[in-house]
Amino acid sequence: MNRFIVVLFSCLCLIVGSLPAQTSRLAMQYFETGEFEKSASLFQELYEKDRRSNFYFDKYIESLLAMEAYEEAEKVVVKRLKKEDNNLALYVTQGKILEAQYKDDEAQKLYSEAIKKMASDRLTIIKLGNEFVKMSKFDLAIKTYERGAKLLKDDIVFSYNLGDLYRRKNDTEKMIYHFLNAMENETTRIDNVKLLLERYLTEEDWKELQLQLYDRLQKRQENVLYTELLAWVFIQKKDFKNALRQVKSLDRRLRENGSRVFDLGNMAVNAKQYDVAISAFEYLVTIKDPNSPFYVDAKKELLDTKRKKITMGYDFEREDLLSLKTEYEEFLDEFGRNKATANILIDLASLHAFYLNDLTSAIDLLNEMIAYPGVNKYEMANGKIELADYYLMKEEQWEATLLYSQVDKAFKDDLLGQTARFKNAKLSYYTGDFQWAQTQFDVLKASTSKLIANDALDLSVFIMDNLGLDTSATALELFAKSELLIFQNRFEQAEQIWAQISTNFPDHSLADDILYTRAQMYTKLRQYEKAADMYQQVIDQYVDEIRADNSLFALANLYENQLNDQEKAQQLYEKLFVDFSNSTLAVEARKKYRALRGDFNDDT
């Protein structure tokens, strides 16, 4: 029996306890549907049962204001104020009621009185500031925090709040000033403040941030926070040269291991600012001890960056290539020829094959690398693919296809395997085995690599179009042979074949393909004006053909990187994603257009 009573009592408690919750939900439903008399009655009932609930009190007052029951609302507030004279939020609520009656002067007096009555208590100050923010009274919130700072005798205790308020008021100069104070006062806010600055600063505003940082650095050179922030600003602006100056200074002052400099060097590489990257890596290999954690990696990145600077289409002399070759050999002398330096041998072989025209040395280097015990399987596969390319360039097609097939078999479901399969299919295309090549290209259209998938699709469609035109495959065989000759750097023989196609097949649809391939040849020869002319002819004369969007993209890239006409490049990228919106190159063209336009935070 006693157990029954206990259970019954518990159930009654649950039922009674759930009644306020049910009433609260019903009151909110009335409030949200605009039935303010009903919501006012229920919130009044709830508030009288729980006088400590600011939520019920606020909703009760809001319901009365919505009903324009100003007198009743003011009585409720004044009654509570008599008991809670230090509850500053009540002054704000009463002021809100007066404003609703257009008694703005009286309301302002109450707001000023609330600010004047503040105690030197941080939580009380923040609560009052938030009350003004909720009403979008940003100037009053600013006065609250400024007086609060004086009361607490701490000039920067409310800097974050003030920075956010000046952001809302679009006062960038003061926003930056207070946010910088906030970061200095509470370093845990740094990431949050950086996000706000990235989101809200315009290009001109970044200059203001930079100026304020310079000013602070002059006054407090010992504060490394400002140097860190200045480096961050330069990185946001992609000014890696000035960013490097700051991170090197930090590295020296804090006696760090070089991680900042190394990371910045990699950022500069990704942005194709190779001179800055080279300076960063040279700093590490010159200043740091050979036993430091970044010394070897910096040496590797230094070689790779120099190779990229020389080989990514920029002007260079043979002496530059020979000097780089010497640096590679010195690296190998210092660190040995073994599994740890396999990737260095791959890069050196590429230099020999594509730029020093020494296929024999390239092949010897890779055969040496493949023989090393314990080489990483991915580096081994990359080496075999490169070696197959060089055998193909040397017209040893059987050796090439054997190596491609080995990688394909070993990495069947991997990107490396798909790359080898694509190259093997292209070898068959070069030699006129179009049926087998097209079968492979059709499979590779589903590749996880967008580049391979797009290239496979293009070649599959190209073969289909050109084999379907007539019963003879002679023209296509000649053209495929010319592409192999270009790959082998045998340019004069390729030109002879194009002339033969034009003479024997004057009306063949390969005309735009010849122009496009000729442009690629001139780019390889660094005859950029001629290449641009070829691409432009494709765009002007064959706008509806498959090579048009590729030519637009390639031409824009030429103007951006080799012909140094950024404005023209921007126009061409824009034309591509507007006029060829279905092109697989449209997304990348939009990215490049935005980068040239100067967007800091690019998206697709």
Image: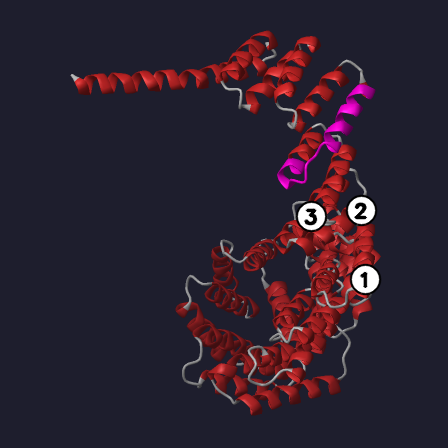
Q: Amino acid at mark 3?
A: Val
Mark 3 touches mark 1? (CB < 8 Å): no
Residue 565, numbered circle? none
| Residue 234, x across and y down, in percent | 75, 61
Residue 174, numbered circle? 2
| Residue 577, x across and y down, in percent | 71, 48
**Mark 2 neighbour density, 10 Å: few (under 14) some (14–19) many (20 or more):** some
Magenta residue check for 174: no
Question: What residue did someone put label 1 on?
Answer: 214
Q: CA distance from mark 3 to mark 2?
A: 16 Å
SS at badge 1: helix
Instruction: Classify residue 149 as left or right of residue 410.
Output: right
**Mark 1 neighbour density, 10 Å: few (under 14) some (14–19) many (20 or more):** some
| Residue 499, x across and y down, in percent | 73, 69
| Residue 541, x across and y down, in percent | 78, 53
Report the span colored magenta: 105-126
**Mark 3 neighbour density, 10 Å: few (under 14) some (14–19) many (20 or more):** many
Q: Quadrant of residue 209?
A: bottom right
* Above or below for 170 versus 466: above
For marks 2 and 1 on the same chain, the one whose residue lies earlier in the sequence: 2
Q: Amino acid at mark 2?
A: Lys
Q: CA distance from mark 2 to mark 1?
A: 16 Å
Q: Nearer the viewer, residue 75 or 4?
A: 75
